Image: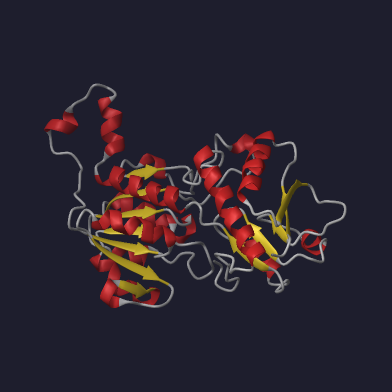
């Protein structure tokens, strides 16, 4: 079994991270050695763990053959940079599939049942939502279109089918109409069928703005939109207008258009250029399905990285190699 040296570029003063590294080291084979912190003086690692490496970090070790991005997605600068290093395979994590899918389902249920506004009123001891017609739409035997039928989409599908919903999956390639799986070029024909549109796509040049005014207008009146992929896949102005006009019943949004750039802006950064917060028919979540720091999810992250390193040490295929041209 070949010896594998992995180095995680990370702040060595992060004591919480040290505990996670200890856990990670307990999960890897004896053939795997893990170091972490700043760049080592004598770099000889085979695997670099970092989401946004520099050319200097990639070139420091002549042995480097693999970059592990320790989160889901592929930062645009990393995608561009790694095309200059074809000898280094790039892999990202999919450990976030269960929490992201669960968040998507939670947003769907909360939106369909108008949980947030009824909760707000009931905190004032107002029982109107119980005794008078109140916005609520059933999902039973409706149709859900999952745009991005990858690991997250496939995780959500059985839950939706459990409510006797028809589930239509859309992915980049390999249609399978017998199982209601179609390719993205068929989207205009599928949107009019969708009572629920669940978006689980990454942001790539091909997907940014994929859902705009035209596409939202193709959805039936009263449809629900949920986005757990990336914000810019849906045009924010088109989404806002479709919600405000009432064409959409509602939306549950986990991913956004503007993000805090530093700790000081964490408490005062609008997530979009339009006032979604003024609408009652949207449930807003601050992109927290990944829940960095959550002990359960951090262990899942470490387990995934251990699986990658063990596969490399055993000479097995390492999961989830990124297609740099496709962007995921």
Q: Is residue 287 above or below residue 177?
A: above
| Residue at 77 percent of width and 59 percent of height | 45
| Residue at 56 percent of width and 38 percent of height | 293
Residue 135 lies, in percent from the top left, at 20, 42
Number of numbered callouts drawn: 0
Q: In this figure, which colouring scheme has been used for the structure?
A: secondary structure
5 with respect to 229 (left or right) = right
Q: Quadrant of residue 248?
A: bottom left
Q: Is residue 85 above or below residue 11?
A: below
- Toward the right, the furthest residue is 41
- Toward the top, the furthest residue is 125
Q: Quadrant of residue 161?
A: bottom left
Q: Is residue 113 above or below residue 119?
A: below
250 with respect to 210 (left or right) = left
Q: In what quadrant of the picture does the C terminus appear?
A: bottom right
Q: Give 213 or 97, whichever is nearer the viewer.
A: 97
230 with respect to 266 (left or right) = left
Q: Give 151 or 220, whichever is nearer the viewer.
A: 151
Residue 150 lies, in percent from the top left, at 43, 64
Residue 75 shows in the view: no
Q: In what quadrant of the picture does the N terminus appear?
A: bottom right
Q: Is residue 203 above or below residue 14?
A: below
Residue 233 lies, in percent from the top left, at 46, 61
Residue 109 lies, in percent from the top left, at 29, 45
Residue 181 shows in the view: yes
| Residue at 53 percent of width and 38 percent of height | 295
């Amino acid at each position: 079994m070949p010896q594998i040296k992995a180095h995680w570029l990370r702040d060595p003063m992060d004591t919480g991270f040290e505990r996670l590294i200890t856990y990670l080291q307990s999960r890897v084979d004896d053939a795997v050695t893990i170091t972490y912190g700043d760049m080592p003086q004598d770099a000889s690692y085979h695997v670099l763990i970092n989401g946004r490496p520099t050319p200097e970090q990639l070139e420091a070790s002549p042995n480097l053959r693999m970059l592990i991005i320790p989160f889901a997605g592929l930062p645009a600068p990393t995608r561009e940079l790694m095309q200059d290093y074809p000898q280094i395979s790039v892999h990202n994590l999919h450990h976030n599939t269960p929490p992201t899918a669960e968040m998507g389902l939670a947003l769907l249920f909360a939106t369909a049942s108008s949980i947030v506004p009824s909760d707000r009123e009931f905190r004032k001891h107002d029982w109107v939502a119980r005794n008078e017609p109140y916005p609520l739409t059933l999902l039973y035997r409706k149709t859900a279109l999952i745009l991005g039928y990858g690991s997250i989409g496939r995780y959500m599908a059985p839950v939706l089918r459990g409510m006797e919903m028809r589930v239509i999956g859309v992915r980049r390639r390999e249609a399978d109409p017998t199982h209601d799986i179609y390719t993205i070029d068929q989207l205009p024909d599928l949107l009019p069928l969708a009572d629920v549109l669940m978006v689980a796509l990454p942001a790539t040049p091909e997907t940014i703005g994929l859902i705009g005014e035209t596409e939202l207008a193709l959805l039936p009146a009263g449809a629900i939109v949920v986005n757990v992929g990336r914000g810019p896949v849906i045009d924010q102005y088109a989404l806002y207008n479709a919600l405000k006009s009432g064409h959409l019943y509602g939306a549950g949004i986990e991913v956004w258009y503007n993000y805090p750039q530093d700790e000081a802006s964490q408490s005062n950064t609008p997530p979009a250029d339009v006032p979604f917060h003024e609408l009652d028919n949207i449930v807003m979540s601050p992109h927290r399905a990944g829940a960095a720091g959550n002990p359960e999810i951090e262990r899942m992250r470490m387990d995934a990285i251990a699986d990658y390193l063990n596969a490399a040490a055993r000479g097995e295929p390492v999961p989830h190699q990124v297609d740099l041209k496709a962007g995921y």
